[in-house]
Structure formats: C-alpha cells, structure tokens
C-alpha cells in the first residue's frame, strides 16, 4: 500500500524554498447531510487544525521530516497556489504543529 503522496496523481515538479514544505491537500471529513435546511451559499467553517502528508521539503528546513510523513498544521496558514492548472499546497515549517 502506498501513501497518498506517492500515488499516481499527476503532481507538478515543485521544489519549495525558504523553509516551506510542499504537502498534500488536507484530509477533511466528508460532509454530513444536515437535517436542517441551510442556505445554498452556506459553507461550514474549516477545522483549525488539519492533517496533511509531506511531499517535499525546502533544503533549509530544520524539522527532520521525510516524504509521506503525516503532520498536523494550522489550516488557515496553508497556501494554495495554482500552477499550470494544478493546485499545490505549501506551508511554512513554523506552522507544523507535529507529526503522527
């Protein structure tokens, strides 16, 4: 069984710099069907902390992480960048709370 960061999804060849870490998209729980009717434009608040997997580290990172390590991060600090029609997710290593 391979981890999500080594699956066959087409990933852009991105190398982070300046202590950034390239990660997978957050693992969010599936949306529940609400028994209460909500407005169509209602969006559930994102969790404060989410789990992601490491894809690649910048050379200057002090954390001893390797590819496929699972880390917990502050979700509001995750940067989503559109490059060549694909989203990449990066986070500064300071916002990694820990591994599991």
Image (cartoon, rainbow, N blue to C red):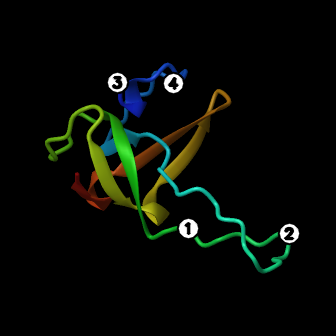
Give the side of residue 84 with respect to residue 93, left or right: right
Residue 41 higher or lower than 6, as above or below? below
Image quadrant for the N terminus?
A: top left
Q: Is residue 19 visible?
A: no
Specify the quadrant of the image occupied by residue 22: top left
Q: Which residue is mark 2?
A: 40
Q: Residue furthest bottom?
A: 36
| Front position among marks 4 and 2 | 2
Give the side of residue 92 with respect to residue 26, left or right: left
Q: Which residue is mark 4?
A: 11
Q: Which residue is mark 3?
A: 1
Residue 12 in the image: state x and y as whole percent.
51, 24
Ranked by sequence position, the earlier of labels 2 and 1 is 2
Marks 2 and 1 sit apart, C-alpha to C-alpha, by 17 Å
Ranked by sequence position, the earlier of labels 1 and 3 is 3
| Front position among marks 4 and 1 | 1
Residue at the (85%, 69%) spot, across then down: 40
Q: Between 75 and 43, which is closer to the camera in this rendering?
A: 43
Ranked by sequence position, the earlier of labels 4 and 1 is 4
Local secondary structure at mark 1: loop
User: Residue 46 — which label?
Assistant: 1
Ranked by sequence position, the earlier of labels 4 and 2 is 4
Residue 2 higher or lower than 90, as above or below? above
Residue at the (65%, 71%) spot, across then down: 44
| Front position among marks 4 and 3 | 3
Specify the quadrant of the image occupied by residue 19: top left
């Amino acid at each position: 069984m391979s981890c999500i960061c080594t699956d066959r999804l087409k990933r852009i060849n991105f190398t982070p710099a300046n202590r950034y870490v390239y990660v997978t998209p957050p693992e969010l729980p599936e949306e529940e069907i609400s028994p209460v009717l909500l407005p169509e434009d209602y969006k559930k608040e994102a969790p404060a902390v989410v789990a992601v997997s490491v894809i690649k580290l910048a050379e200057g990172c002090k954390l001893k992480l390797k590819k496929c390590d699972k880390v917990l991060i502050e979700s509001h600090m995750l940067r989503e960048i559109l490059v060549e029609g694909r989203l990449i997710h990066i986070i500064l290593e300071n916002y990694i709370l820990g591994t599991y």
